[in-house]
Amino acid sequence: MKTFLHVGDIGCLQTALAEAREIKADRYKYEHLGHHRTALLIFFNNSLRTRLSTQKAARNLGLDVIVLDVNQGAWKLETERGVIMDGDKSEHLLEAIPVMASYCDIIAVRSFAGLKDREYDYAETIVNQFVAYSGRPVMAMETATVHPLQAFADLITISEQGIKRPKVVLTWAPHCRALPQAVPNSFAQWMNAADVDFVVTHPEGYELDPKYVGNARVEYDQMKALAGADFVYAKNWSCPGVTCPESYGQILSQDMSWTVDTAHMAVTNNGKFMHCLPVRRGLIVTDEVIESPNSLVIPEAANREISAQVVLKRMLETL
């Protein structure tokens, strides 16, 4: 595996899930693979679960780990070509990438969307430069438009519940800040590839990019969408700019009736609640729901270690 950005990069999902189960049963089984190898984790943005889980997964495989916070202690990096660098950015990414690559065997990158320019964000300008110029396997730890490690962990969590072809509902929920579409994009992409009955529900104007929403059924009536659901995945995202290009990255609604509460969960099939974390209680979900026995947010987060380890293992096997 040379890159990990999309569900197609992982290959057969059943094989990947079997590998996840194997690793979860013995996290150090493949520790020899990383001997005298180094993983470089590059963060352009803040992280808690991604940083800790990916670092732990790498060490389970025997890898040495270097963590770089680009905005804390490193030179400010220019990412655009053809610019006159007379501002506060001292180094260009095109020089920084091969330099960083010379110190490692695998690169993992985390870089959020700017939510100002849809074309720039959806071109995946930053991560694609690492793919093009590093000469190393590149793993996305969340990019402008996708978060495949989270989606893989979500799929592992769903599979562990043992429900045959479950109904999975991705529901938009309100938030006080404009958030990227990376998590819902990847979740939709992975659920479309899995053996689930997949429904997406959101207010009008929040339509996800067709290449991610795929064959999912889109329902604008949230309660209708949630009826009979086995899994409820709540997430906020800003306007993706699909039906409203001029509103890309903006908040179009703060309708609190979309907050997942006990009334919403009551219409499900004893549904399990999921969220990628961090979560804004009272906006995305109520205390009663996230603290209930049907909340999977903690095991879901724990599975981030497993999803990262499967990907890193496969990358090591190609070196």
Image (spheres, rainbow, N blue to C red):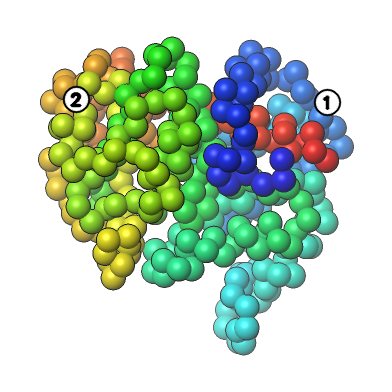
Amino acid type shown at disc 2: Ala
Count neighbours of disc 1 (C-alpha within 10 A) and say few if under 14, some if 14 to 19, many if 20 or more: few
Which one is closest to the eye, mark 2 or mark 1?
2
Question: Can the viewer see residue 78?
Answer: yes
Q: Position of residue 208 (x, y in %)?
A: 34, 51
Q: Position of residue 241 (x, y in %)?
A: 32, 62
Count neighbours of disc 2 (C-alpha within 10 A) and say few if under 14, some if 14 to 19, many if 20 or more: some
Question: Can the viewer see residue 299?
Answer: no
Q: Position of residue 304 (x, y in %)?
A: 54, 31
Q: Which one is earlier in the sequence, the residue at label 2 or at label 1?
A: 1
Amino acid type shown at disc 1: His
Q: Secondary structure at mark 2?
A: loop
Circle 2 sits on which residue? Answer: 227
Residue lying at 40% horizontally and 44% vertically, measured from the top left = 214
Residue lying at 45% horizontally and 68% vertically, measured from the top left = 119
Q: Is residue 97 above or below residue 106?
A: below
Circle 1 sits on which residue? Answer: 32
Q: Residue 286 occupies which quadrant of the picture?
A: top left
Q: Residue 99 occupies which quadrant of the picture?
A: bottom right
Q: Quarter of the image containing the N terminus?
A: top right
Is residue 46 or residue 239 the one in the foreground?
A: 239
Q: Is residue 117 above or below residue 53?
A: below
Residue lying at 57% horizontally and 65% vertically, measured from the top left = 125
In the drawing, does residue 41 fall left or right of residue 99? left
In the drawing, does residue 29 fall left or right of residue 176? right
In the drawing, does residue 210 fall left or right of residue 1? left
Residue that protrudes farthest toward the front in the picture = 215
- The span from disc 2 to disc 1 (Cα, nearest Å) is 48 Å
Q: Position of residue 34 (x, y in %)?
A: 80, 33
In this figure, what is the number of numbered marks?
2
Residue lying at 67% horizontally and 47% vertically, measured from the top left = 3
Q: Residue 234 occupies which quadrant of the picture?
A: top left
